[in-house]
Image: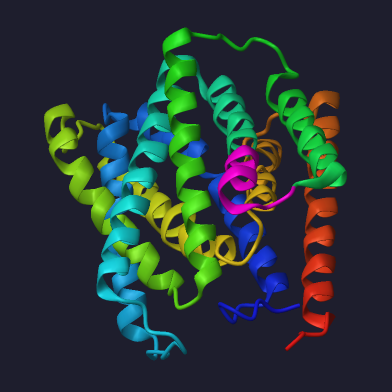
Amino acid sequence: MSNAVSGLPVGRGLLYLIVAGAAWGTAGAAASLVYRTSDMGPVALSFWRCAAGLVLLLAARLLRPRVRTAVREPLGRRALRAGVTGLGLAVFQTAYFAAVRSTGLAVATVVTLGAGPVLIALGARLGLGERLGRGGALAVAGALAGLGVLVLGGGGATVRPAGVLLALLSAAGYSVMTLLTRWWGRDGGTDAAATSVGAFAVTSLCLLPLALAEGLVPHTADPGRLLWLLAYVAAVPTALAYGLYFAGAAVVRSATVSVIMLLEPVSAAVLAVALLGEHLTAATLAGTLLMLGSVAGLAVAEAREARTRQERPVLV
């Protein structure tokens, strides 16, 4: 079940993506709490998220024993990968946070995460030659249906055109980031930790002037709470989640990656019910079951296909 090119087993890559998706699900709620606690804007929040996440990743990289890869990646390719991935990450994160502020968490989440799998499936078919198949198409459709039921089932969502456009921009950035990670991962020699560090460094540099213009240091009546929220956002849905995401996305088909990452709103819904006292509605339960079923089906199909590729004899 391993990917012979990168060395990371596909099964482990799937597990990494599941954990990353669950961790991402806490970012939107944390961002909403940051907005309530301070006057921090979405660009400044993205900057602090990436900058603090970069520090944590560098610290972890220094403490961890260095592992030599079988294929050494050329410096030019590493720089190009870090630059393009960092730009995609900057667009993805900042546009999403801006969409949350403009049109609300529910609509921003549905549009961003709903458009992502469609764009990625098209890009993977045209650019990577990855066929989704009838089963995969049904799984994507089921996941998107579950997403809509889960997030919009309660009603009360307000749709604003500007927020929808920002969410579509976020989906485009996410799609480019996912497709390029998979493309480079197929060639081997990529280091997920180095990818994360390079991407966050580029993203932080891109966001710094915009964050300065927006207001880098926020005003707040509760600085301690704000610092804890920022520390959490940097550690869990950023440093941990993106490190796992880049590792898993390099060995798992792009369409499967996009559907697994739909676990983000599932995680957010579970968190809202378990910790924030929200009621478990029929829409929440139905949407969660639809999405979990779709994710499980695609994950099993991905693992089975990887096992078949491994067992297939090599003709020489």
- The image quadrant where one finds the N terminus is bottom right
- Which residue is pictured at 65% across the width and 41% down the height? 121
Residue 115: name its quadrant: top right
- Which residue is pictured at 31% across the width and 76% down the height? 74
Q: Is residue 94 magenta?
A: no
Residue in the foreground of this view, choosing between 82 and 33: 82
Residue segment shown in magenta: 120-131
Q: How many marks?
A: 0
Side of 92 relative to 133 (left or right): left
* Residue 241 visible, this orientation: no
Q: How is the image coloured?
A: rainbow
Side of 290 relative to 5 (left or right): right
Residue in the foreground of this view, choosing between 98 and 185: 185
* Residue 87 visible, this orientation: yes
Is 181 rendered above or below residue 68?
above
Side of 75 relative to 140 (left or right): left
- The image quadrant where one finds the C terminus is bottom right
Across and down, in percent, residue 19 comes to: 63, 60
Residue 63: name its quadrant: bottom left
Q: Is residue 128 magenta?
A: yes
